[in-house]
Amino acid sequence: MVLRVGRTTSALTAGAAVLAALAPTTALAAQEPLQGEGRQQLRWERCAADQPASLECTTVKVPLDYADPGGRTIGIAVSRIRAGSAAKRHGVLLMNPGGPGGAGLAMPAAMEPLLPSEVRERFDLIGFDPRGVGRSSPLECGLTADEQILDHPYAARTFGQDVARARNVADKCWAKAGDLLPHITTRNTARDMDAVRAALGERRISYLGHSYGTYLGAVYTQMFPRRADRFVLDSALDPALVWRGVLRGASEAAEHAFTRWTQWAAARDATYRLGATPQAVRAAFWDLVARADRTPIPLEGQLFDGDAIRAQYRAFTEVEAVTPFVVALRAAAAGTPAGPGAAVPAAAGAPDADNAVSAAWAVLCGDARTWPRDPEQYRRDAVRDRAAHPLAGDLGANIQPCAFWKSAPREAATAVDNDVNALIVQNQWDPQTPLTMAAGMRRALHGARMVTVADGQGHGVLVTGRPSCAQDDVARYLTTGRLPAKDRTCSTSHHG
């Protein structure tokens, strides 16, 4: 999942992070989706003046409601960069950048320079804006900046406000987009992917999904196993935890990352002066949080209270980046100017945050029937999780708009349990989809292999463009279809 958060003063900001030569035009077999009128005739044109000329766009028409295929249709915006070699072309590689709520139309252009030449030769790179996002019938609830927030700290005195905010988000979404909301789900997006496959004239698709995109890809393999070719899942989440368990699981993983950071900082006490032992570093951090709760700390034009500091919990997986931030906060609290390298961890935004967040809530609330309806359940969970995971437990467990969603999901969450082959690549220290979640994806996909990057930091192995020991495995799999013989852990420092 790539829905990120940041916080300044008393408000967290959330948004979804965003970052093909066609087969012959003969119609596919009668069992293809939307076959009644024959294969769609696609008209390709340049996507945008500020995008490469090689990035072409078109629109694929799909039913809003797949249970009523003859009813209302919506358009799915699709992009492509053609394969580099007609002779070596293998097929299409669909891509999803994450979210939910992430627009993917520009993803082929973003990923093309990051993929090895042998992959670019063989695949048309295919991007798309998922239904409800970007140029694909965008959903907007009219949310204020405060209502676009994912993580809210729990406090007894403010819980009533949290409940009211969650209810208001749900009410706004249903009032403004009630005709779309029930149909903006992962299962329907997977169906859209299959409709895109058919419109492109392909019998199978390959796929590269990041974060939330790993879940979307896994759902596709469950729904359309015979049409899944080579699937790469970068930074995977556990499909069994969709969706509340994913939010709570991230804060649990943050506690492990925080513990590792205290060890790292203690070993470098001569440089950072945060404490010579992990216990001392931990104490220094919590003293800083307590001090900020009494008097918010100014840093780079922002005010940080204790909750604002805790809200940077995902940053602790990047030990070299987060440590100067903590040092600068300490200095600012003491009235000393911050030194170099003290940047506040960046909060990911979106070109249209209302669309991104609205679409995210549609998916998060519409995919699963496991969201509690009783606000008191969220209160109890927030208190319990904060006690178990002091850094961010309450942030992941506090009440969300799904508690007040007007309609139960039309379909149950997909139980992913199949033998389709796939390659999962995962950093050991991922702040969004931690290693334990990727292991859950691996358990669900029995035919998959998983490559873990030892000491790898950050959310994304391939999509970040950083050199990684997993790159050769990905290139080999995409070009030959061969998975590693078994799950493996590699070290980027040794590149293999």
Image: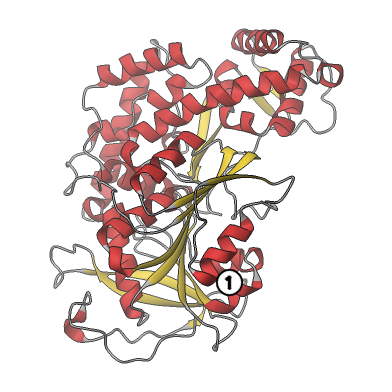
What is the x, y in percent for residue 358?
A: 37, 47
430 vs 302: above or below: below
Q: Is residue 54 left or right of residue 414?
A: right
Q: Nearer the viewer, residue 107 or 294?
A: 107
Please report the residue visible at 45 percent of the width from the left and 74 percent of the height from the top.
92
**Looking at the rendering, which quadrant does residue 165 occupy?**
top left
SS for tag 1? helix
Please give left or right for residue 291 compared with residue 87 in the image.
right
The correct choice, above or below, for 336 with respect to 66 in the image is above
441 is higher (above) or lower (below) than 53:
above
Q: How is the image coloured?
A: secondary structure
Count all numbered tags in the image, as a single digit. Answer: 1
Residue 106 visible: no
Local crowd at mark 1 within 10 Å, few (<14), some, or many (≥20)?
A: many
Residue at position x 74%, y 47% in the image: 494
**Residue reaching furthest to the front:** 485
Residue at the spot 34% in from the left edge and 36% down from the top edge: 241
Q: Nearer the viewer, residue 95 or 439?
A: 439
- Note whether residue 236 is visible: yes
- The amino acid beneath tag 1 is Val
What is the x, y in percent for residue 403? 25, 31
Question: Which quarter of the picture shows residue 158?
Answer: top left
Location of the N terminus (image quadrant): top left
User: Which quadrant would residue 375 be assigned to in this image?
Assistant: top left
Horizontal side of 3 relative to 63 (left or right) equals right
Q: Nearer the viewer, residue 423 or 58?
A: 423
Q: Position of residue 104 (x, y in %)?
A: 48, 61
| Residue 207 at x, y percent in the picture | 44, 64
Q: Which residue is mark 1?
A: 119
Residue 485 vs 307, above or below: the answer is below
